[in-house]
């Protein structure tokens, strides 16, 4: 797996509501990672990474991740799932082919990822008080078996209308 793909904390595909009713979440929208703050050499950083969370039918959540690599290659991954922790398939070719998601609060999304049946990472998406900055905390294990935690910072692509 390419180093920049493994280090960019995004991949995956999120879920939705507890009850089948649409959940209004301040996480809905399109988010762009602050590429300059990624913990990797500048030449290895992707040109851009965006993640979109959107409500889907039957109280589910759709997630789309789009990455433009340092070489200009475009990749994406997508899924639609419930927020009940039931695994769903991820379409595309990033670091996961399966995701399981829960939303303990409308401003927090927890995502567990795997590929080919091998555990991948856990991602926790949280919002700041303004609702226009999202933090992704990714936890997984390095090649040496030691735990690795990294934090990525996102800005809302289109700011929310004032409440």
Image (cartoon, rainbow, N blue to C red):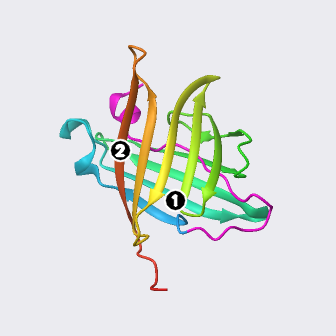
- Estimate how packed mark 1 is, as few (under 14), some (14 to 19) or many (20 or more) residues with alpha carbons within 10 Å: many
Between the C-alphas of marks 1 and 2, the distance is: 18 Å
Which quarter of the figure has residue 43? Answer: top left
For the point 70% across and 43% down, which residue is it?
85
105 left or right of 16 in image: left
Residue labelled with disc 1 = 52
Magenta stretch encompasses residue 12: yes
Q: Main secondary structure of the magenta part?
A: loop
Percent from the top left, x then y, of residue 26?
53, 69
Farthest-out residue, bottom: 163
Residue depicted at 22% across the width and 50% down the height: 36
Which sits in the foreground, 32 or 147? 147
Residue at the outermost left position: 42
Q: Which residues are magenta?
A: 1-25
- Residue matched to label 2: 151
Q: In screen coordinates, is 20 left or right of 77?
A: right
**Where's the N terminus, which quadrant?**
top left
Asked whether 120 falls inside the magenta stretch, the response is: no
Q: Horizontal and vertical percent for residue 58?
A: 79, 63
Could you say where residue 110 lies in the image, as x and y percent from the top left? 57, 47
Relative vertical location of residue 20 with respect to residue 143 in this rendering, above or below: below
* 80 or 93, nearer to the observer: 80
Among the two numbered marks 1 and 2 on one chain, the one whose residue lies closer to the N terminus: 1
């Amino acid at each position: 797996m390419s180093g920049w793909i493994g280090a960019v904390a995004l991949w995956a595909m999120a879920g939705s509501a507890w009850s089948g009713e649409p959940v209004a979440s301040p996480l809905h929208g399109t988010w762009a990672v602050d590429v300059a703050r990624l913990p990797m050499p500048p030449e290895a950083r992707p040109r851009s990474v965006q993640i979109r969370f959107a409500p889907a039918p039957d109280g589910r959540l759709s997630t789309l991740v789009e990455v433009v690599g340092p070489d200009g290659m475009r990749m994406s991954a997508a899924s639609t799932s419930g927020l009940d922790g039931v695994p769903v398939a991820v379409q595309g070719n990033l670091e996961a082919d399966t995701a399981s998601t829960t939303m303990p609060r409308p401003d927090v999304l927890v995502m567990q990822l795997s590929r080919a049946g091998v555990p991948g990472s856990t991602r926790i998406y949280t919002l700041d008080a303004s609702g226009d900055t999202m933090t992704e905390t990714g936890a997984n294990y390095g090649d040496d078996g030691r735990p690795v935690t990294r934090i990525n910072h996102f800005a809302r692509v289109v700011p929310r209308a004032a409440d």
